[in-house]
Amino acid sequence: MSATGPAAVEVPVPEPNLTAAEIVARAAALKPLLREQQDESERRGCYSETIHQEFLTAGFYRMLQPRRFGGYEFDLPTFWKAMVQISEGDPGTGWGLTLGSHHALVVGSRWSERGQREIFGPTGDFRGPHRPQPMGTAEPAPGGYIVSGTWDYCSGAPYATHFLGNVAVRGRDPADRRAPVVVVPRDQFTVLDDWGGGAHLGMQASGSNSVVLDNVFVPEHLALDEDWTGGSGATPGTELHGNPMYLGMVFGIYHAGLALTVVGAARAALEEFEGIITSRKTTFPPQVMRYEHHDHQRTWGLARGLTDSAEALLYHAGETYMELCHRWARLGTPFTKEDDARLFGILQQSGRLASEAVELLFHGSGSSAARRGQRMQRYFRDVAMYRGHVAAQYLNTASGFARLHFGLSDRIL
């Protein structure tokens, strides 16, 4: 079981006394700037250098990073609350920021002390998208692997300091389903210019570019050749950082990085819809302000209920994760794969409800909201990208949840 005492600090954080309330407030304060640059961010394919510097200064990239290596080590609900605020300003930007920074949690959980020290570096400057599909190949070599491949949809890549990608090991028995995760620094991979500018339907500001590795040597201490989504007992992170949050049961909560952006989109769409119905009259007589008409009242009321429910489920999942980790540390009660799967299911429903809210509001906004450049149209497109994500297919995973519960399989997917 993990120690619970404070860990040594090797890399000082920029603001040692920064509080959870302050960092969430900083995220909320950026919403006007994020909305002002929505069009520009979509054309570019990622948020601007100006916004990146704001994120650096605010400390968002360091929120889940271990304090020992220059992070703030905030809990998951705090991180998610800040990222919802960013996503309310621009869902695509929120997607890119979240998926470029929340992998500090899995690195802090699963990599060895040597690996973490090298990854987080002497200044604690870490941003690393992770593509779990094994799109690259690894050739075993003395002390590590030679890795090549192209991974698409690497959200957060333009501002990344590192890349995390799963690989298939040449010569390994096909029955062995392990696919090591390798961590590669920025000077050893190429980011392709294949995102933004209308190339994809939505999330165009997310920086989900492809990443290429060409015969890159990855040492063993930067390659995790085990189940990175969970296991039993203490992890390198719980021992090193004295914080049970780094237990590494991340299969379920990985989905929060997707769902929270849709929750932000739902909050933004609800605000946009309110602006529409309080400034326009109904089309047909007797003409009244739209907010005075029961059709628009019903749409707004239903959408708010869906949005509030989605947000409540999101934070409940984060609080439950923290509780399960601390229960393990206090009592030795296992954080099981089924516990992890249940968190996944809750977060899928959070994303589903938020998506339904945005779709309802878009359909109720009228044809003028469907024009290119309209915020409601952007939120609808961004949600459509989430809806198509493999992890959002709740009907497909439902059977896997049942098989796991009844002991018919130890895997969901």
Image (tube, rainbow, N blue to C red):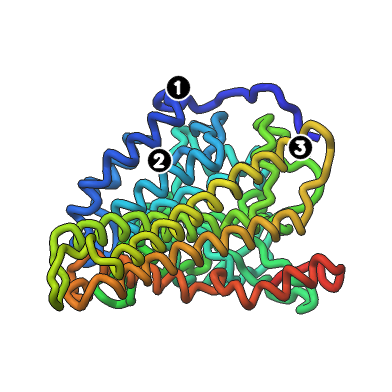
Q: Are marks 2 and 3 in contact (CB under 8 Å)?
A: no
Q: Is mark 3 on a helix, strand or loop?
A: helix
Please indicate whether residue 379 sits to the left or right of residue 105 in the image.
left
Q: Distance between the residues labelled 2 and 3?
A: 27 Å
Please indicate whether residue 351 sits to the left or right of residue 368 in the image.
right
Question: Where residue 327 is drawn, which disc sits there?
Answer: 3
Residue sitting nearer the eye, 272 or 177: 272
- Extreme residue in the right direction: 407
**Residue 232: where, in percent of width, then height?**
81, 49
Name which quarter of the figure residue 326 lies in.
top right
**Residue 136: where, in percent of width, then height?**
56, 72
Mark 2 or mark 3, earlier in chain = 2
Q: Which residue does the image show at 57% across and 66% down from the upper left? A: 147
The C terminus: image quadrant: bottom right
The N terminus: image quadrant: top right
Q: Hey, what amino acid is under mark 2?
A: Phe
Q: Distance between the residues labelled 1 and 2?
A: 14 Å
Q: Do the residues labelled 3 and 1 touch (CB within 8 Å)?
A: no
The answer to whether residue 187 of the structure is visible from this angle is no
**Residue 271: where, in percent of width, then height?**
28, 55
Mark 3 or mark 1, earlier in chain = 1
Q: Hey, what amino acid is under mark 3?
A: Arg
- Mark 1 sits on what residue? 16
Question: Where residue 60 is drawn, which disc sits there?
Answer: 2
Q: Which residue does the image show at 76% across and 58% down from the upper left? A: 338
Q: Hey, what amino acid is under mark 1?
A: Pro
* Badge nearest the viewer, 3 or 1: 3
